[in-house]
Amino acid sequence: MEAMTYAVPNILVVDDINANLVMLTEIIRDVGYIARPVNSAREAMSAIEALAPQLILLDVSMPEVDGFELCTMLKKNVSTRDIPIIFISGLCSSEDKIKGLKIGAVDYISKPYEAEEVTLRINTHLKIYRMQQELAQYNKKLYQVINDQAQKIYVGQKNLLYALARFFIGKDHLKAEHLKNVGKNSRLLAMSMQLSHDNTENINTSFIEVIGIASGLHGIEINTLKEIYSYNEDNLFLKVAIDIAEYHHRYWDGTGSLDGVSGKGIPLSSRIVSVAEAYDDFLAENSTYLETAHEKSIKAINDASGKRFDPDIVRIMNKIQNQLGR
């Protein structure tokens, strides 16, 4: 990781007594830091808005808005909550110290104080703050690297399916058109189900993209897909493609099922592709009468709703039928 460079730390000092401001300002400047003295919470907020400090020395007893209230406000604000706050106060009871720490302060110095003590506390908390900033920056870069790698893997997985689909299709233009329509309509059905008010299947954007691509392999021999998957078990697209190839001809009511798989036991991807594929197949069967092919295809699917097809998917199909690719 690249080394981070830092400007000279600026420290905001908030106290309504000028003598205290002068003393703390001198201590801060003697250490080599920038001191920014203000004598009220209102002035403190304006100073923070103008330039965020690396540390705040805050008196508790102030008129109007006291130190505890100011600290609470700063800790509730996402842009200021990470700024370390040290209370410096003549209130030295255990209750006051505990309260200060509970509302988010990192330390509590009781008056009267020694310059050396203040200096040590300032240096300690500036160091901790700097380490936290470095860690946050490192985590941000690490996240970016991981995200970039994940994206490369994701693209690689998609490209593998595209390559398999091209190999499977070869020069068969009719098959290519069929798979294109099935993929488009499967994606459209999944998207419409996601937007439905009763999206009980918890469909997300990733699923929509996966089914649009994986559906293009539904005609490949299942054992071939499984063999390829055995060498690429982290490929989500292949896993969905296997589900589709294996189950998309299963009937919703379990008719003809030797293993008893039916209803929602059939993977969602397979149930969606089953409807999308049937629509395109019915269109081809009725292609002689183009003006009625769509209507006949929709009717055939509705007639088999609850038997061959998932009735919820058929219901969604009816709502978007005019948008289906033909």
Image (cartoon, rainbow, N blue to C red):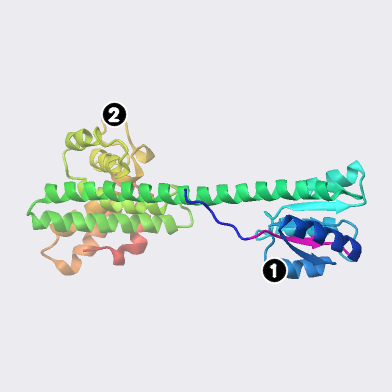
The answer to whether residue 53 is above or below residue 265 is: below
Q: Position of residue 200 (x, y in %)?
A: 46, 48
Kind of residue indicated by mark 1: Glu
Q: Is residue 31 left or right of residue 312?
A: right
Q: Is residue 175 left or right of residue 55?
A: left
In which quadrant of the rendered view does residue 24 lie?
A: bottom right
Q: Residue furthest left?
A: 171
Mark closer to the observer (1, 2):
1
Q: Secondary structure at mark 1?
A: helix
- Asked if the residue under mark 2 is in contact with the one under mark 1, i.e. CB atoms within 8 Å, the reply is no
Nearer the observer, 153 or 160? 153
The residue to which callout 2 is attached is 259
Residue 49's disc number: 1
Q: Is residue 296 left or right of residue 203?
A: left
Q: Residue furthest top?
A: 259
Residue 212's disc number: none
Identify the residue at horizontal 35%, vertical 51% (top origin): 151
Q: Secondary structure at mark 2?
A: loop
Q: Position of residue 316 (x, y in %)?
A: 37, 57
Nearer the observer, 244 or 18? 18
Q: Position of residue 317 (x, y in %)?
A: 33, 58
The answer to whether residue 324 is above or below residue 216 is: below
Residue 95 on the magenta segment: no
Q: Position of residue 188 (x, y in %)?
A: 32, 59
Please report the bounds of the magenta region as a residue range. Answer: 8-16
Q: Is residue 240 left or right of residue 78?
A: left
How crowded pointer 2 is (Cα within 10 Å; few <14, some 14-19, many 20+) is rated as few
Identify the residue at horizontal 56%, vertical 49% (top origin): 134
Nearer the observer, 98 or 317? 98
Kind of residue indicated by mark 2: Asp
Identify the residue at horizontal 35%, vertical 53% (top origin): 208
